Image (tube, rainbow, N blue to C red):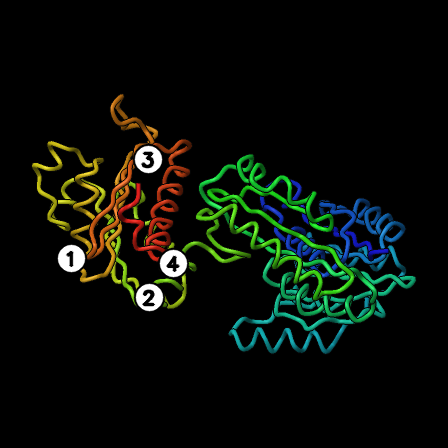
């Protein structure tokens, strides 16, 4: 039987909606990928009675329990005190942890405050994970069941899951089925369209499971395989991937967690191409996304935000007569923007977007969501007209994503410029 694990997230900010929980989803996905079954996820507030009830119920139901949140030094961090009372384990000052906290604060020139000492008081008999300055994690074995207590800060929690919890579970609980999973980021197809193209796969391969998850503006497809041996699972995934790639040809942006801008960066680097961008309606969003990738200076030369007609004329030398006759949101303007940013920068590629993000500014001829995208290279130019739906922010995101995807498509196939 698979090991059953419950995840408990503690924090008033989680149940009031002030903070969106990231921890449970990450932990569940990582545990699932190693063959462990997450049977329940619970989010509760910083209330002693509720925490006590959740811990006792989880102890009865699950084989292992993962708890996040409430390990800090503020007044509402009460997880440790509740654990002490529920399991009759007196709090003991962990002098080693206290010393490490003092040294860490000293290195950062932060004066000592007695509030930090609260972090170093832990239930008797627990095993401390490698501590961090403001939070720590620990393992408590209670009646043969491991309880993992982790900080609620996502970066810290994820580090503990990967470096402490999963290795511990793999060492102490053998015989688990192996689960392998691949994730495909898809753009340009709706979820029902993806499902239609792949609906027969689960019948062909009985041990696989497909999952569809919106991740605006993309859709995410997960393919999971369960097997007794890792090599069988990997081989089956390889076979399934050939089918998925064939049926979703052109729509798969990347696999696993790679972003579109990371994919573009790799392609530009591999092909030794450079890129510059001229943006109007996206207001710099495309440049921001490109430069969010470390090392992007190797292939990204410049980005200009030419929001007004004046800026288009002064910075890109777009003729006033073009803007007057065709309009700022037009094929002619978009192509000239792409050409000018490419030639001015000396880049291999020039990318441009211009449009109406709304909520105002639309006309019957050019309603809100009207966007022109243009891509220019030494081979020629291509422009495309789009009508995006949604809020102002959604239209900007869709425009940026579509434009970046044009770059990806061109880098994969030079003939993209001459396709319909």
Residue 136, image x, y percentages = 68, 67
The residue where tag 3 is placed is 386
Using the numbered discs, state the Cα–Cα distance from disc 3 to disc 1 in whole angstroms: 25 Å
Helix, strand or loop status at disc 1: helix
Q: Are marks 2 and 4 in contact (CB under 8 Å)?
A: no
Q: Earlier in the sequence, mark 2 or mark 1?
A: 2
22 on left or right of 84: left
Q: Residue furthest top?
A: 364
Which residue: 77% across, 53% down?
A: 37
* Quarter where residue 349 is shown: bottom left
Q: Nearer the viewer, mark 2 or mark 3?
A: 2
Using the numbered discs, state the Cα–Cα distance from disc 2 to disc 4 in whole angstroms: 11 Å
Q: Nearer the viewer, residue 170 or 22?
A: 170
Can the viewer see residue 279? Answer: no
Can the viewer see residue 249? Answer: yes
Q: Earlier in the sequence, mark 3 or mark 4?
A: 4
The residue where tag 2 is placed is 271
Q: Quadrant of the N terminus?
A: bottom right
Q: Are marks 3 and 4 in contact (CB under 8 Å)?
A: no
Helix, strand or loop status at disc 3: strand
Q: Quadrant of the C terminus?
A: top left
Q: Which mark is residue 22?
A: none
Count of all numbered marks drawn on residues in the image: 4
Q: Nearer the viewer, residue 355 or 206?
A: 206
The residue where tag 4 is placed is 264
Using the numbered discs, state the Cα–Cα distance from disc 2 to disc 1 in whole angstroms: 19 Å
Residue 203, image x, y percentages = 70, 43
* Quarter where residue 114 is shown: bottom right
The residue where tag 1 is placed is 343
Helix, strand or loop status at disc 2: helix
Q: Residues within 10 Å of mark 1 (few under 14, many from 20)?
A: some
């Amino acid at each position: 039987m698979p090991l059953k694990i419950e995840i408990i997230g503690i924090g008033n900010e989680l149940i009031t909606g002030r903070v969106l929980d990231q921890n449970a989803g990450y932990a569940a996905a990582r545990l699932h990928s190693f063959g462990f079954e997450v049977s329940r996820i619970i989010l509760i507030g910083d209330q002693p009675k509720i925490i006590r009830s959740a811990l006792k119920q989880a102890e009865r139901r699950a084989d292992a329990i993962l708890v996040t949140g409430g390990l800090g030094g503020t007044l509402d961090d009460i997880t440790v005190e509740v654990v002490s009372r529920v399991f009759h384990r007196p709090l003991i000052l962990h002098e080693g942890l206290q010393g490490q906290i003092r040294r860490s604060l000293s290195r950062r020139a932060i004066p000592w405050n007695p509030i930090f000492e609260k972090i170093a008081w832990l239930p008797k008999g627990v095993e401390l994970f490698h501590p961090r300055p403001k939070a720590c994690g620990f393992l408590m074995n209670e009646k043969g069941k491991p309880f993992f207590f982790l900080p609620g800060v996502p970066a810290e929690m994820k580090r503990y899951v990967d470096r402490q919890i999963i290795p511990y579970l793999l060492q102490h609980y053998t015989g688990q089925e192996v689960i392998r999973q691949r994730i495909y980021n898809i753009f340009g197809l709706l979820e029902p369209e993806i499902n239609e193209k792949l609906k027969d796969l689960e019948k062909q391969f009985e041990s696989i499971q497909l999952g569809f998850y919106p991740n605006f503006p993309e859709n995410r497809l997960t393919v999971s395989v369960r097997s007794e041996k890792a090599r069988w699972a990997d081989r089956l995934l390889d076979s399934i991937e050939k089918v998925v790639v064939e049926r979703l040809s052109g729509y798969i942006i990347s696999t696993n967690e790679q972003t579109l801008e990371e994919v573009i960066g790799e392609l530009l680097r591999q092909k030794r191409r450079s890129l510059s961008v001229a943006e109007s309606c996206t207001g710099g969003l495309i440049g921001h996304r490109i430069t969010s990738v470390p090392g992007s200076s190797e292939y990204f030369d410049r980005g200009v935000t030419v929001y007004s007609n004046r800026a288009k004329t002064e910075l890109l030398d777009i003729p006033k007569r073009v803007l007057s006759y065709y309009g700022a949101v037009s094929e002619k303007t978009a192509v000239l923007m792409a050409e000018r940013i490419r030639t001015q920068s000396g880049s291999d590629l020039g990318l441009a977007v211009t449009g109406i993000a709304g909520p105002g500014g639309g006309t019957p001829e050019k309603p809100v969501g009207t966007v022109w995208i243009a891509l220019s290279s030494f081979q020629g130019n291509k422009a495309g007209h789009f009508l995006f739906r949604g809020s102002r922010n959604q239209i900007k995101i869709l425009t940026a994503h579509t434009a970046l995807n044009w770059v990806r498509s061109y880098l994969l196939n030079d003939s993209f410029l001459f396709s319909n």
